[in-house]
Amino acid sequence: MPPRQPRRRSYDQYCALARTLDAVGDRWTLLIIRELLAGPRRYTDLHADLPGVSTDVLATRLKDMEAQGLATRRKLPPPGAATVYALTPRGSELLPVLTALAEWGTPDLAERRATDALRAHWFALPLRRRLPATEVPAVVDVALDEGVFHVRLGGEGPAYGDGPAETPAARLVLDADTCHELCEGALSVEQGVKAGRIEVLGDGPVAAALRGE
C-alpha cells in the first residue's frame, strides 16, 4: 500500500485571499510562476534560474502547481523531445499580480546586496509597465551586461522571455542601475537616451517612439 500523502497546509478560511495563498503562498511558488511567464521551461532551466532552490523543493512545488491547475507538464515534439512545464490559462492570470508585487518591491532594489544573484530577465515584469505604449504590438530586446531578455508590449504570447527575440522591433542597451531607475519610474527611456545612459537600436516606429521622436 503506497504511503499516505500528507495534506497540504491550508488556512482553512472561506476567504478569496486565503484561497489564493493556499495555492501560491508557499516559498518559491511565485518565483516559479515568474519564470514560467516567459514561456515553457525545462526543469533544468528552472533550477538554473532559481538559485537557492533545492531539487526536492522545486519538484514538489511543480507537482503542487499541477495539482492546483496552475501548470502543466508536456513533452516537446522531435527534435526537441524535452519535457517542459508551462502555465495554464489560470496560472497566466497571475501576470498582473506578479507585476504589481514586482513594482511594489522595486524601491528595495536601490542597494544590491553582495549575496544577491541576478538574472537580467528578472527586470522584465516591472519594466514592461514603464515602457511607452506602442501603436501596434511589439517585442523589444533589453540588453544589460548581465544578459539579454525581451518584453512583449501588447499582443498575444508570453509577457517576456530570456534571451533576444527572433524579430525585435527595437533594442534597449543599458546597465542594471539604469534599468532599476526605469523600473522605479525615476527615469524614462527618453530621458535616459538624452542623458546618454540608454541606447535605442532600430529604425522603425517603435524605436523612434522609445527615443521620444
Image (cartoon, helix red, strand yellow):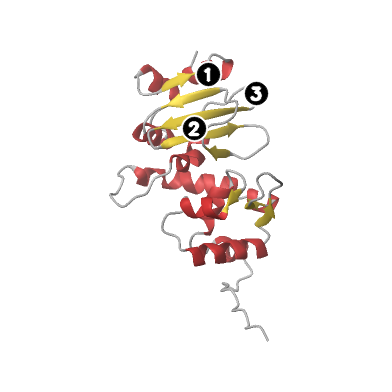
Q: Position of residue 38 (x, y in %)?
A: 57, 43
Q: Are marks 1 and 2 in contact (CB under 8 Å)?
A: no
Splitting the image into 4 quarters, where does residue 165 fall?
top right
Please give left or right for residue 19 compared with residue 115 in the image: right
Identify residue type, mark 1.
Ala
Nearer the N terminus, badge 3 or badge 1? 3
Q: Nearer the viewer, residue 32 or 135?
A: 32
Q: Of helix, strand and loop, which one carries label 2?
A: loop
Q: Quadrant of the N terminus?
A: bottom right
Q: Of helix, strand and loop, which one carries label 1?
A: helix
In this rendering, the label closer to the viewer, 2 or 3 = 3
Q: Are marks 2 and 3 in contact (CB under 8 Å)?
A: no
Residue at 63% x, 21% y is 135
**Residue position marked by numbered label 1 in the rendering:** 207
- Real-space Cα separation, disc 3 to disc 1, in angstroms: 12 Å
Is 155 situated above or below 75? above
Please give left or right for residue 108 compared with residue 172 in the image: left
Identify residue type, mark 3.
Val
Of all residues, the one furthest to the front in this rendering is: 79
**Residue position marked by numbered label 2 in the rendering:** 130
**Residue position marked by numbered label 3 in the rendering:** 136
Nearer the N terminus, badge 1 or badge 2? 2
Residue 129 visible, this orientation:
no
Please give left or right for residue 196 compared with residue 49 in the image: left
In this rendering, the label closer to the viewer, 1 or 2 = 1
Disc 3: CA contacts within 10 A as few (<14), some (14-19) or many (>=20): few
Q: Position of residue 71 (x, y in %)?
A: 65, 56
Residue at 57% x, 22% y is 169
Q: Of helix, strand and loop, which one carries label 3?
A: loop
